[in-house]
Image (cartoon, rainbow, N blue to C red):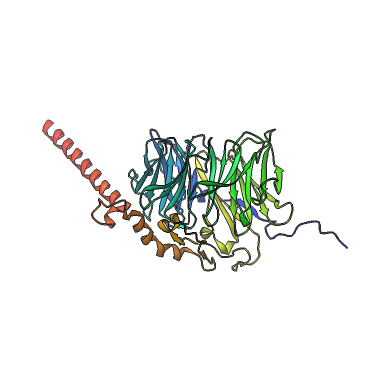
Amino acid sequence: MFKKVVRSSKFRHVFGQAAKADQCYDDIRISQMTWDSNFCSVNPKFVAMIVDASGGGAFMVLPLSKTGRIDMSYPTVCGHTGPVLDIEFCPHNDNIIASGSEDCSVMIWEIPDSGLTTSLTDPVVKLEGHSKRVGILCWHPTAHNVLMSAGCDNVVILWNVARGEAAVRIDSVHNDLIYSACWNRDGSQILTACKDKTLRVLDPRKGTVLLEKEKPHEGSRPIRAVFVSDGKILSTGFSRMSERQVALWDPKNFGEALTLQELDTSSGVLLPFFDPDTGVVYLCGKGDSSIRYFEVTDEAPYVHYLSMYSSKESQKGMGYMPKRGLEVNKCEIARFYKLHERKCEPIVMTVPRKSDLFQEDLYPDTVGPEPSVEADEWFEGKDAQPILISLKDGAVAITKAKEFKVHKSLLKTTTSSAGSQQDSSGEVQSLRKEVKDLKAAIEELTKRVNELESKH
């Protein structure tokens, strides 16, 4: 009998490929801040990147199609008075993005469908409640208009965005800096990694600790953790000898790791991106020039190394496209947006297949843009599984139907001063500002012409 030497997996031959030069976004000055967040967020409409800004903080939002060189004068979102540390698009409305900043505030912005025409300085909602800088943001996966933020004041706040208020404040659990915070698949639990070398699973509404694991990694450098399939937890961190590690934990038996693997001795924090549809986790090191990817399964050693995408340039940040934004006819299973110092480069992960027909085994039904529960219901205790969609015919049509409803309810309680709902949309505001600026410019020129004429 032959012994099976190689584990069979349809993702064994996944390969990464960088986009051609004309498909990149060039001449963008990416933020120089030393903060371990992604610095980039993407969805099927836009790509957003935190950029360098003199005085205050800014980020740029580009329609995906706007590739090539970006003009220096391209408008930004620049309402923060301190550097922006994290940005994240809302999963239920592609035009809504949240930003957290060193100025201790969280702001919610609405981007017009065609992108920005003038710089945006007034947010739709400003959320104030942190006493130190806000470095982590994460939208609730299923509840509409629920946002989690974590700040350097060691506090986690859950916001009811439509009401513009802090609904839950978890301030007595973490006694040191929070390195990462994320939701599980249905948003019924929160997972945090903290500088006190502890992983905690929290009940989000009560703010109580359900489970905790001390010293998942012995080293003192930052730890990251995400929920993977079946409620298991994948963490990245460092050993006592500063070697980078990846580990998998079963919260039902937190004592011993299911697996703990040492990777290398680089110093960058490993950002994990998990795809629940394929079971593949991608580890992108801040400052690395590679993306390693592993398959998480139920059989030992549980986290199986697949391959590595390597390039010459190191990454300053990384955006991860939701599944509904991928090109299914090209067997694309993930797309990253890698930030260099002066550009953003898409990297496509593909499963090699000969047929260009829809591959059902690669694309099970995935999380769609429709929220399954409203904010008020969720805070009252109702959990709901995400609403799934098929990618067979593309998922673009579905996001369109939801948009107006979402943005109306998002603005409902925050623009009561505005006369009508439509007047408050970002597009109208930007047009008014443009008209005002043009009038001022004409007045200035008329004045100069009159002065010159009087001299002659």
The relative height of residue 196 versus residue 25 in the rendered view (above or below) is above
Observer-nearest residue: 234 or 30? Answer: 234
Name which residue lies at 28% across and 57% down. Answer: 421
Name which residue lies at 63% across and 35% down. Answer: 267
Observer-nearest residue: 247 or 198? Answer: 198
The relative height of residue 344 versus residue 334 in the rendered view (above or below) is above
The quadrant the C terminus occupies is top left
Q: In the rendering, at what x and y percent does residue 26 appear?
A: 48, 44
The quadrant the N terminus occupies is bottom right
Specify whether 236 is left or right of 51: right
Name which residue lies at 69% across and 46% down. Answer: 257
The relative height of residue 190 versus residue 197 in the rendered view (above or below) is below
Outermost residue on the top side: it is: 455
Instruction: Tell me which corner region of the image, top left, top right, bottom left or bottom right, holds residue 402.
Output: bottom left
Q: How many marks?
A: 0
Q: In the rendering, at what x and y percent does residue 80 appear?
A: 38, 39
Asked if one can make out residue 5 in the rendered structure from this viewpoint, the answer is: yes
Asked if one can make out residue 271 in the rendered structure from this viewpoint, the answer is: no
Specify whether 45 is left or right of 267: left
Observer-nearest residue: 247 or 355? Answer: 247
Q: In the rendering, at what x and y percent does residue 48 appear?
A: 45, 47
Specify whether 98 is left or right of 189: left
Q: In the rendering, at what x and y percent does residue 363 appear?
A: 59, 64
Observer-nearest residue: 150 or 96? Answer: 150
